[in-house]
Image (cartoon, rainbow, N blue to C red):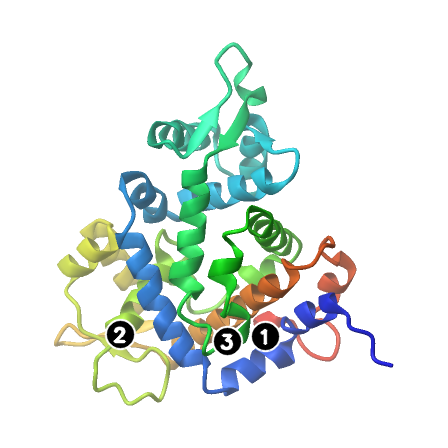
């Protein structure tokens, strides 16, 4: 008799064959297109603190790290958050302290009183911050349920605090144990993802792609002024200029005489692969977060290394 193994079902979504199946199926490109629209709508709906967090990747990384640490029964402290951000991302105390000060001012966080040494002060994540997390998931995945079954009821499920905690812990453990599954990996999109709002630029280009693009590749060409791009992406024109110049120098894109940005097939392919992997990770998290069990670290470590190349090579 076949035994139901929920962790096997979750981790099966992360194999190279599963990623390849999603890439070959009809739902991936429509899903990425909707995700681009939803992600942008989420960012533009934010208040001042939310915009400040989403404007730079390192701030978003601190927010995600804090959310995962807080999701444990023990919660977290300012010192533990700082140590984690230092060890994993190289952030200094000033960056983390600034994030905490702004989070307290916005009402998203509470921090223990000043009569306790800074590193030992406990952090209290407020309902407002948890709602930002839910809104982010809703913006990114909430309109994909008809294309990807695992996302069909995720927004409703995450209203339950315990499910939200499980979702965060599962995603956090996968991020720590298998960064190759959640990071961009080495390849043409690195010229974007090595910068703040990097993936956001690619999603923006996809959302604003030329209407007469022939569909031969996911990301083909877009016509947008540098002024508008800087304004819409909440960055400086210098940031945009350097991004485009280095993108052209790397061969990831070409700037035509008319000002159109034309993307290389290699960039488009890498972008599509990484989006497929990211969606598969989120599908696996949606399955695994409903399980009353810790992450199966042993099987997670073997995913992508048995029966095929690592996912980064799919």
Q: Nearer the viewer, residue 57 or 136?
A: 136
Element marked by disc 3:
loop
Left or right: where does residue 233 sit relative to residue 219? left
The residue where tag 2 is placed is: 254
Classify mark 3: residues with Cα within 10 Å, few (<14), some (14-19) or many (20+). some
Q: Nearer the viewer, residue 27 or 237?
A: 27
Element marked by disc 2:
strand
The residue where tag 3 is placed is: 148
User: Viewer-nearest of labels 2 and 3?
Assistant: 3
Residue 249 visible = no
Residue 222 visible = yes
Image spot of residue 216 (x, y percent): 35, 89
Image quadrant in which the N terminus is located = bottom right
User: Viewer-nearest of labels 3 and 1?
Assistant: 3
* Figure check: 199 above or below 96: below
Left or right: where does residue 97 sit relative to residue 256? right
Instruction: Please give the label number shown on residue 313.
Output: 1
- The residues bearing labels 2 and 3 have C-alpha atoms spaced at a distance of 34 Å
Element marked by disc 1:
helix
Disc 3 vs disc 1: Cβ atoms closer than 8 Å? no
Q: Nearer the viewer, residue 216 or 103?
A: 103
Image spot of residue 179 (x, y percent): 60, 57
- The residues bearing labels 3 and 1 have C-alpha atoms spaced at a distance of 23 Å
């Amino acid at each position: 008799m076949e035994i139901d193994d929920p962790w096997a079902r979750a981790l099966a979504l992360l194999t190279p064959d599963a990623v390849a199946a999603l890439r070959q199926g009809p739902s991936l490109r429509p899903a990425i297109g909707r995700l681009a629209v939803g992600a942008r709508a989420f960012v533009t709906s934010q208040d001042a603190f939310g915009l400040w967090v989403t404007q730079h990747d390192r701030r978003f990384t601190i927010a995600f790290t804090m959310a995962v640490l807080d999701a444990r029964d023990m919660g977290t402290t300012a010192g533990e958050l700082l140590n984690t951000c230092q060890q994993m991302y190289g952030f200094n105390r000033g960056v983390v302290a600034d994030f905490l000060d702004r989070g307290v001012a916005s009402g998203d966080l509470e921090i223990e009183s000043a009569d306790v040494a800074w590193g030992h002060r406990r952090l209290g994540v407020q309902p407002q911050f948890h709602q930002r997390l839910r809104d982010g998931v809703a913006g990114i995945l909430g309109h994909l349920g008809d294309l990807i079954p695992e996302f069909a009821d995720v927004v409703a499920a995450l209203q339950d605090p315990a499910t939200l905690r499980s979702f965060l812990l599962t995603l956090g453990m996968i991020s720590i144990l298998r960064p190759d599954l959640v990071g961009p990996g080495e390849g043409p999109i690195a010229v974007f993802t090595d910068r703040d709002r990097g993936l956001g630029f690619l999603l923006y280009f996809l959302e604003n792609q030329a209407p007469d693009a022939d569909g031969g590749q996911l990301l083909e060409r877009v016509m947008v002024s540098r002024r508008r791009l800087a304004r819409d992406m909440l960055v400086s024109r210098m940031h945009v200029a350097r991004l485009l110049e280095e993108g052209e120098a790397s061969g990831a894109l070409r700037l035509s005489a008319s000002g159109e940005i034309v993307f290389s097939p290699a960039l488009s392919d890498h972008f599509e692969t990484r989006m497929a992997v990211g969606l598969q990770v989120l599908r696996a998290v949606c399955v695994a977060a409903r399980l009353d069990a810790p992450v199966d670290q042993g099987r997670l470590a073997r995913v992508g290394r048995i029966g095929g190349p690592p996912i980064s090579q799919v």
